[in-house]
Structures are given as C-alpha cells and as structure tokens.
Image (cartoon, grey):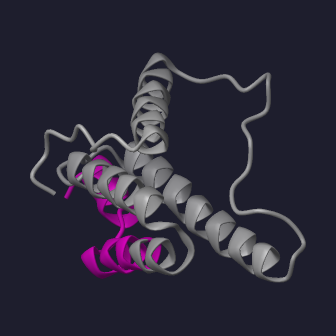
Amino acid sequence: MSDKKQEILMSTYSRSQVLSLYRSILRLHARELPAEMRSLGDSYVRSEFQLHKSVTDASGLAGFFRGWEDYRRQMAEGARKAAAGEGTLGKNLPGDAKLSDEQMEKLEELREEASKIGRGDSMGRTDNG
C-alpha cells in the first residue's frame, strides 16, 4: 500500500464514528430546537452528511468531521447554558468572519429558509429528506 493511501486510511473516520456524530446532532436538535428550526437543521445536517459521503480527501474529511464535532459541542454547551438561564442557544458570527464563496452561498440558503419559517411559509425543500 502506498504511503498516500495509508495516510488517507489512517486519517479517515470509521462509519460508526460518523453515524454516532450524525445521530448525536439529530438528538440534540430533537431535544433543543423548536419544531420549525429542527426541521431546517435536520434537513441541513442530512444534506451535508449525504454530500460528504463519498469524499476521500483526508484533509477534507478531517475538516468536515472537526467542524460538525465543534457544532455538536457548541450546541450541547449552548443548551446547557440556556437551561441554566446563562445565555441563549446559538451564537452570532463575528463581523470579521472570513467565509468562502461556498460558505456564503450556504449561509444565504439558510437565511432564506429561516425567513420562510419566520413568515410561516412552507419549507421550499427539493430533497426527499
């Protein structure tokens, strides 16, 4: 086996690790988010995990996993603080946040969906999830 293949195998996450993270995020959503936001959040998580299902780039997978692990941790911490009356769930992006074009596009999609929910519109999803 080449060094590169071995490096990719050693740096990827097992199916059980990925499923465990995915399920723990969905459980947090079920426990902590209002129904409308849960639907949006679950849809987004499902879509992102589905899109990254066939990624083989080790650094891409590591970043993806690390990002969602951070999200899970922040979500759990925010829920704990909100329950104790020490804050609210979620956090604002800093004004100087540097986002890629892809991140800006995703953020805009989320903003549009959240606006629809806020107005009481149905979610304009095109996926089957």
Residue 116 occupies quadrant: top left
84 within the magenta span: no
Q: From this view, report whether residue 98 is shown above or below residue 75.
A: above
22 within the magenta span: yes
Give the x, y percent position of residue 93. 72, 36
Indicate left or right for 24 with 69 as reference: left
Q: From this view, report whether residue 115 is shown above or below residue 36.
A: above
At horizontal 51% and vertical 76% (from top left) the residue drawn is 28
Give the x, y percent position of residue 74. 68, 64
> Relative to the observer, which residue lies in front, 119 or 32?
119
At horizontal 53% and vertical 68% (from top left) the residue drawn is 33
Q: From this view, report whether residue 92 is shown above or below residue 65.
A: above
Q: Which residues are magenta?
A: 1-25
Residue 11 occupies quadrant: bottom left
Give the x, y percent position of residue 90. 69, 56
Q: Quadrant of the C terminus?
A: bottom left
Q: From this view, report whether residue 12 is shown above or below residue 18.
A: above
At horizontal 37% and vertical 80% (from top left) the residue drawn is 20
Give the x, y percent position of residue 52. 27, 49
The single residue placed furthest to the right in the displayed view is 86
> Relative to the observer, which residue lies in front, 16 or 97?
97
| Most common secondary structure along the magenta stretch | helix
Q: Quadrant of the N terminus?
A: bottom left
